[in-house]
Image: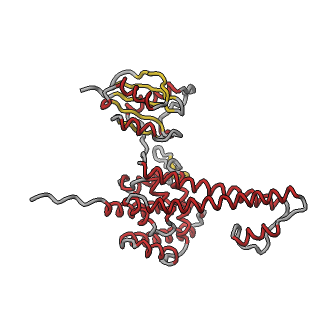
C-alpha cells in the first residue's frame, strides 16, 4: 500500500505555494502554481494516486473553492485555523515557500486544527446574514457621523424622544437648518445615506425571511426551534445556524463554548491558577449575536409579547419550550446574583452569553434528532 503524502498549500488569490511531507521522510517544496482549476488538477495528477494525498491550507479570503476542487478530485483536504498554526518565537523570515513547508510538516505531525467547512446552503445563508450585519454597521457609522456633526454645531435635539426614533429623525429634518448652504448640504447628505441604508436593511431582512422559508427542512427546523429562547428571533437564529452548521457535531456544550471564544483565557503553572478575559479565539459574528441576546435575561422570567407570539406562530415542541423556560429562570437568577456582587454588567452579560450557548445546544440537538429520517425496519 502506498504511503500517505501530506501536502501543504499556501493559497493566495493568484498563486498557490506547494510543499510535500513524505510519511517519515523529508519535507520539500514543489514550487508555485497558478490558482486555477486546471493547475490544481495537474498538481493532483503529478502527485497521484489521489487516495494517498492529504492536503491542507489556511482559512482566508479565498474561501473554500480550493477545498471543493480537491474534494471533487477525490483528495482528502482540510481547511486549517490560521490562529492555531504553531509558530517559533524566534522565526523572523516568512515566505510562501516556508509557510507551505510548515503547513505540510505540522499537518504530518497532527498539530493543526481544522475548521468546519460549510456546505452550499449554509454558506449562502451565512453570506446573506453577514451582508445584513455589514449594513447595520454602516447605519451605525452614519448615525454617529450625523450626531457628532450636530453636536459640533450646537444642535441638540430637545423633546425629540429616544435617539434615532422617527420622532428624533423628524426633529433633525425640521430644526437642523443653518444659514450656510454647505452645512445644509452636509445634513441632507447624512440623512440621505441613513435613509438609503435603512432601505438596504429592509430588503436584506426580507431576503433572509425568504431564504429561511426555502432552506432545507433540517436547517429550517433548528432555526425555528431556537426562537423559543428569549432574545433569539429569526435573524439571530439564522446567524447561529449559518455560523455553526450542525450543533450536534459538538459532543457537549463545553466544546461549543470553547469554540465560540466566550471562555476565559488561562495561564496556570504549578499551584498558581490565573484566568483572565475571554479568549475571543472563535467566531466573532456568533459572539456578537449571543451577547445581544443575553441582555434580555436581565428582566424577570416571563413568556409573553414577542416570545409568546413566536412560540405560537411556529408551533414549537414542548421540549424546546421547556428548555427555553429553564434558560430564562437560570440566566436571570445568574444575572441577579452577579449584579449583587458588584460585577460589571458587560462582564455579567458575557457570562450569560456563554451559558446561553448550552441551552442553544440542547434545543438544536433535540431539533436535529427529530429531523433525522427514521431508520427502515429490518426484514424479519
Q: Which residue is at a point 75% across and 73% down the rendered structure image?
A: 160
Indicate left or right for 314 with 191 as reference: left
Counting every numbered tag in the picture gives: 0
Q: Does any portion of residue 339 appear in the rendered image?
A: yes
Indicate left or right for 252 with 259 as reference: left
Viewer-closest of 224 and 162: 224
Q: Which residue is at a point 63% across and 61% down the rendered structure image?
A: 199
Viewer-closest of 227 and 182: 182
Indicate left or right for 185 with 237 as reference: right
Q: Residue furthest left?
A: 380
Q: Quadrant of the N terminus?
A: top left
Q: Does any portion of residue 275 appear in the rendered image?
A: no
Q: Position of residue 86 (x, y in %)?
A: 47, 35
Task: Indicate how the structure is coloured in the image.
Answer: secondary structure
Task: Give the answer, above or below, for where 63 lies relative to 167.
Answer: above
Q: Position of residue 308 (x, y in %)?
A: 47, 76
Q: Which residue is at a point 49% across and 47% down the rendered structure image?
A: 272
Give the quarter of the image for residue 174. Answer: bottom right
Q: Position of residue 128 (x, y in %)?
A: 52, 54
Q: Position of residue 153 (x, y in %)?
A: 85, 60
Q: Quadrant of the C terminus?
A: bottom left
Amino acid at each position: 500500500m502506498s504511503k500517505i503524502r501530506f501536502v501543504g498549500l499556501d493559497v493566495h488569490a493568484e498563486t498557490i505555494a506547494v510543499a510535500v511531507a513524505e510519511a517519515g521522510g523529508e519535507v520539500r517544496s514543489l514550487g508555485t502554481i497558478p490558482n486555477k482549476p486546471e493547475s490544481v488538477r495537474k498538481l493532483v495528477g503529478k502527485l497521484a494516486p489521489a487516495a494517498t494525498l492529504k492536503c491542507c491550507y489556511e482559512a482566508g479570503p479565498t474561501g473554500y473553492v480550493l477545498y471543493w476542487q480537491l474534494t471533487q478530485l477525490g483528495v482528502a483536504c482540510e481547511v486549517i485555523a490560521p490562529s492555531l498554526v504553531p509558530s517559533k518565537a524566534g522565526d523572523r523570515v516568512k515566505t510562501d515557500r516556508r509557510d507551505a513547508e510548515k503547513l505540510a510538516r505540522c499537518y504530518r505531525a497532527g498539530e493543526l486544527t481544522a475548521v468546519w467547512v460549510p456546505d452550499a446552503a449554509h454558506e449562502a445563508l451565512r453570506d446573506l446574514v453577514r451582508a445584513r450585519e455589514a449594513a447595520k454597521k454602516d447605519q451605525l457609522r452614519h448615525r454617529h457621523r450625523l450626531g457628532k456633526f450636530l453636536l459640533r454645531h450646537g444642535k441638540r435635539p430637545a423633546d425629540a424622544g429616544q435617539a434615532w426614533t422617527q420622532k428624533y429623525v423628524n426633529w433633525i429634518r425640521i430644526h437642523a437648518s443653518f444659514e450656510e448652504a454647505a452645512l445644509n448640504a452636509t445634513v441632507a447628505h447624512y440623512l440621505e445615506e441613513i435613509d438609503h441604508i435603512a432601505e438596504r436593511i429592509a430588503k436584506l431582512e426580507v431576503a433572509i425571511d425568504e431564504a429561511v422559508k426555502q432552506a432545507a427542512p433540517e436547517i429550517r427546523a433548528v432555526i425555528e426551534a431556537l426562537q423559543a429562547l428569549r432574545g433569539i428571533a429569526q435573524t439571530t437564529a439564522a446567524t447561529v445556524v449559518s455560523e455553526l452548521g450542525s450543533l450536534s457535531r459538538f459532543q457537549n456544550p463545553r466544546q461549543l463554548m470553547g469554540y465560540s471564544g466566550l471562555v476565559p483565557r488561562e495561564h496556570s503553572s504549578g499551584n498558581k491558577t490565573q484566568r483572565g478575559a475571554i479568549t475571543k479565539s472563535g467566531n466573532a459574528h456568533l459572539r456578537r449575536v449571543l451577547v445581544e441576546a443575553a441582555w434580555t435575561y436581565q428582566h424577570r422570567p416571563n413568556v409573553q409579547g414577542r416570545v409568546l407570539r413566536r412560540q405560537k406562530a411556529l408551533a414549537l415542541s414542548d421540549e424546546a419550550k421547556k428548555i427555553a423556560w429553564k434558560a430564562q429562570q437560570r440566566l436571570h437568577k445568574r444575572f441577579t446574583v452577579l449584579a449583587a456582587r458588584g460585577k460589571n454588567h458587560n462582564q455579567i452579560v458575557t457570562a450569560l452569553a456563554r451559558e446561553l450557548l448550552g441551552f442553544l445546544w440542547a434545543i438544536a440537538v433535540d431539533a436535529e434528532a427529530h429531523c433525522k429520517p427514521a431508520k427502515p425496519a429490518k426484514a424479519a
